[in-house]
Structure formats: C-alpha cells, structure tokens
Amino acid sequence: MELKVTTKTNQYPIIIENNFDGLLSAFENTGLIGRKLCIVSDSNVAPLYLDKITDMFKGSFIKVVNYIIPAGETNKNLDTIRDMYGFFVQEQLDRRSVLVALGGGVVGDITGFAAATYVRGIPFVQVPTTLLAQVDSSVGGKTGVDFNGHKNMVGAFYQPHFVYINTSVLETLPKREFAAGMAEAVKYGYIIDKSYLKYIADNSEAIKALEHSAMAEVVYGSCKCKAFVVDRDEKETGLREILNFGHTFGHAVETLSGFKLIHGECVAIGMMAGLYFSMKRGNITAEELASAEELLKYFDLPVRVEGLNVEDIFKQMFYDKKTKDGKLNIVILNEVGNAYTEKNASDDEVIAAIKYIVE
Ligand SMILES: NC(=O)c1ccc[n+]([C@@H]2O[C@H](COP(=O)([O-])OP(=O)(O)OC[C@H]3O[C@@H](n4cnc5c(N)ncnc54)[C@H](O)[C@@H]3O)[C@@H](O)[C@H]2O)c1
Ligand SMILES: [Zn+2]
C-alpha cells in the first residue's frame, strides 16, 4: 500500500508493507542510492533489524555506516545530537548523504532533527518500528529533542524523502507499546474518520493478532488522517489542534502519574474525558461513550486513573504547551468522526470530565 503526502514544500510517499523487501527499490525510486548512508537506530531495535537492512544496502551505496543510540527518551537531547554531528564529520558525510531513522519516535525525532540541521539539511528517510511511530510521529514533519527536561523544546519542521513502514516489526514490540499506538489510531477515528473507527472496531481481533492486512489498514488509515490534517496546517496554526484530542487531559495525567503510565495510555484516559465532555454537551450519546470505553479496554488500554486528585489534574492542565494565554483549549467532538477546539469550556465542565476519569 502506498500513500502520497503533500506538503506546501514537497510531496513524499508512505509505503506500507509487511517486510523490508521493497526498501531498496524505494531508495532507487527516490534517487537516493549511490551516496553515503548512515542508519540511525537504538540499542533495542538495532540487534533485531539493523544487520538485515545494512546487508541489503551494501553495493547500492558508496558507504553504509550505523549510529546506535541507547534506547529511551532520556537520550533525546542535544548531547546525542552533538555526538551524532561528530560521527558524521568523522565519516565525512556531506550534503548528498542520507540518514535513515530505524526505530520508534525517539529515533525518528532525533534523526530528523540531525538531518534538518547537519550541513543545513540532508535527506532523511523514516523506517518507523513502533506502532506510535508508524501511525503518528513519522508523519507530519515535526523533528526535535528535549531540552533541560522540557519535551520537544528544540526542533524543526523537516519532511522525510519517504517513509517505509514494515508492519511485521510490530511482532517484537512490547505489548504495552503496541496498545499505546492503538490509542492514537483510535483517536484519528474519533476526530476525523468514523468509517476508520468502525474498521478498527469490526477488525479488532485481527488487529490484536497483528494480521498483516488488518495492520496495513490501521497504519494506512491513521497516516491518511494525520496527513490530511497536516497537509492543511503544516506549521500548526489551527486545524492541527484537533490532533490533541485527549492530550490536554492526558498530558496532565502523564505528568502527575510520575510517568508510570506511558503516553498512549494517558491519551486513552484523556480521550475518555474528552468523550464524556462531548456527551455532556449532547454531541455524542451515552452508548457511543460506552463503546469507546469497550474498544480502548479491548486494546488493553486504561480508561481511568487511580490515585490522582481532580483539582491537581485541573491545575496541571494549565501548564500544557497548547494552553494559550491562560485559557484552556479543549478538543471535543461535534459527533463521532468530527472534532473541534472548544475555546469556551467552563471550569465546571472540565472538572466534571476529570471526575469521570478519576477512580
Ligand atoms: N514528531 C512527532 O510528530 C511526534 C508525535 C508523537 C510522538 N513523538 C515522539 O515520539 C517519541 C515516542 O515514540 P515511541 O513511542 O515510538 O517511543 P520509543 O522510540 O522510545 O520506542 C519505544 C520502545 O520500543 C522499542 N522498540 C522500538 N521498535 C521496536 C520493535 N519493533 N521491537 C522491539 N522494540 C522496539 C524502543 O527501543 C523503545 O524502547 C517521544 O519522544 C515523542 O515526543 C513525536
Ligand atoms: Zn500523542
């Protein structure tokens, strides 16, 4: 399967397969062979997939080198970037050289930022290996690193030459990470595409079993939804805000839970708050709220949080990056498959939604 993403500055394909067999021809088709290539990966992904890819590339590139980052968000910082630049200089990478991000969102964000900035920008390719990266972070062109403990403080908008998604790599992904990716996939259904949501609900068993055709549909549908929004709002001025559905509540829970819950899990909880809010406004039915809960639970996602205080969550929400001028902007649904940013949410409505998700 292939999806074309159009941005103001260029167009690139997202190729969805269940193996790496087409990766080299994707390089050929985009004119990126015969150069120096650096594959960036992390310490979990590299032992699983790096050798296979490196071997496949030998003969088609002037030189293939690897750069492996220790796995984890704590390494998504400028120290890692500096070390990478050092390696690139040592390996004499130049403006024609290509970077490949083989890994999850952490590797993708770091590699994209290194590509955007090294010698003022070199081509890069995304080969996302987590479900979150396949359905979310590899699409949209946001790259960057954390700075002094602040997430994604430093970065650039920079598009890859192409994205190659092999859904079979999800077989080695820890179950919790898979569930976290499903939260974002379900999110697209609620905010943009009702028929996509129905597909997920109707094929939930096949998806959980990682059947290729079902996974390809899930990834394709999510990328299509995200690309649709990003095409219309590349630099995040308005429409793109709807991608934050569940996130304002979710980020607060994520922070207050001391990061015991991972991002996608908090998004699932946050979506329940957003859906409850939407129901209270009369925009969705109680049945629709109940079926959301059922679907998220089926994918082993939490829908409530224990041990947190309602008032603390409410206060924490004002620290969200997307909160403008001290006013809460809450993404809610007009109906299933259609979302907007509610700029006039009353404190009572927000608190009622928080109460709904606190056990
Ligand atoms: N650029 C964007 O638009 C955007 C959007 C959402 C999230 N993000 C960023 O993405 C990051 C989170 O990404 P993530 O959830 O992919 O985390 P991650 O990259 O840390 O990957 C999660 C874990 O899974 C491991 N892993 C990856 N693929 C594997 C595989 N196939 N088999 C076994 N293990 C595997 C990783 O080594 C890591 O331990 C955050 O830094 C977040 O800020 C960026
Ligand atoms: Zn998210």
Image: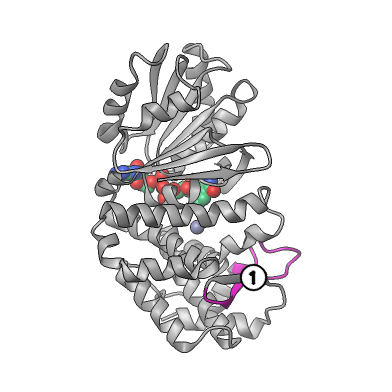
Q: Residue at x 58, y 82 (%)?
A: 351
Residue 299 in which image quadrant: bottom left
Can you name the residue that lies furthest to the right here? 325
Residue 29 in sight from this viewpoint: yes
Q: Is residue 156 above or below residue 151?
A: above
Quarter containing the C terminus = bottom left
Q: Residue at x 39, y 57 (%)?
A: 218
Q: Is residue 343 above or below residue 151?
A: below
Residue 56 horizontal side relative to residue 150, left or right: left
Q: Dot 1 surroundings within 10 Å: few (below 14), some, or many (20 or more)?
A: many
Q: Which residues are magenta?
A: 317-336
On whether residue 350 falls in the magenta region, the answer is: no
Pinpoint residue 84: horizontal percent, then vertical percent. Answer: 49, 24
The residue identified by callout 1 is 340
The number of discs equals: 1
Q: Name the residue nearer the viewer: 122 or 149.
A: 122
